[in-house]
Image: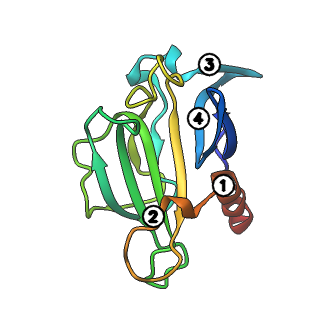
Amino acid sequence: NPPSISANQQYGWRKSGSALDFHKGIDISRIPTGTNSYNKLGDFSVNNRPDVVSIANGTVVRVDRNNGGSEGKCVAVVCDLDGDGVMDIQVRYLHLATIPDGLSVGADISREQVIGKPGGSGNGSATEYGVHLHIDISVYVNDSGSSPAVDNTIDPNAFFRQQVINEE
């Protein structure tokens, strides 16, 4: 099922200062805490935030445990959605607060496996956009095996909706 979340930035055009830029993912900043109630991720200590989990089976292609740069601590996973041996998408999880020690490049990862805890690194800090998790999905346009261009992104919300349709 799609996650019960509130996104503070959706996929698409947004105002950044006095200019427009294209946001290539979704930023998740809130979680449900009860009936019709949401709390900001930053309201919780890191250990009390929900786990970030993989949205699909795949292979880890990037793990960055550094806090520098706009992406902060991040993990990227490539996924073969239809089982034909060709990678279909790359999913990036940015601004993580923690990443499990055992997670490394080349490791197989399964859907719903823990990738870390959200928020706080890179521009995911309170001084920029507030504590949040950024997820973006890039589509491979051929089977060359090279990384997809970030410009080949799709709206993650559409991916979540399609996964629900496929599971019904």
Residue 110 image position (x, y, % from top left): 42, 60
Question: Which residue corresponds to the image point at 31% horizontal and 39% vertical from the top-left?
Answer: 99
Q: Secondary structure at mark 1?
A: loop
Q: Amino acid at mark 4?
A: Ile
Q: Residues within 10 Å of mark 2 (few under 14, many from 20)?
A: some
Question: Which residue corresponds to the image point at 36% horizontal and 49% vertical from the top-left?
Answer: 75
Question: Which residue corresponds to the image point at 70% horizontal and 59% vertical from the top-left?
Answer: 164
State the separation of the CA atoms marked 1 and 3: 24 Å
Q: Earlier in the sequence, mark 3 or mark 4?
A: 4
> Which of the 4 image quadrants contains residue 115?
top left
State the separation of the CA atoms marked 2 and 1: 19 Å
Q: Return the residue at label 4.
A: 28
Asked whether 2 or 95 is in front, the reply is 95
Q: Amino acid at mark 1?
A: Asp
State the separation of the CA atoms marked 3 and 4: 11 Å
| Most distant residue in the right direction | 36
Left or right: 146, with 127 as reference point: left
State the separation of the CA atoms marked 3 and 2: 29 Å
State the separation of the CA atoms marked 4 and 1: 14 Å
Q: Residues within 10 Å of mark 1 (few under 14, many from 20)?
A: some
Disc 3 to disc 2: CB gap under 8 Å: no
Which numbered disc, 2 or 1, marks the residue closer to the eye? Answer: 1
Q: Earlier in the sequence, mark 3 or mark 2?
A: 3
Q: Earlier in the sequence, mark 4 or mark 1?
A: 4
79 vs 112: above or below? below
Q: Return the residue at label 3.
A: 39
Q: Earlier in the sequence, mark 2 or mark 1?
A: 2
Q: Amino acid at mark 2?
A: Asn
- For residue 127, say whether it is visible: yes
Q: Return the residue at label 2.
A: 57
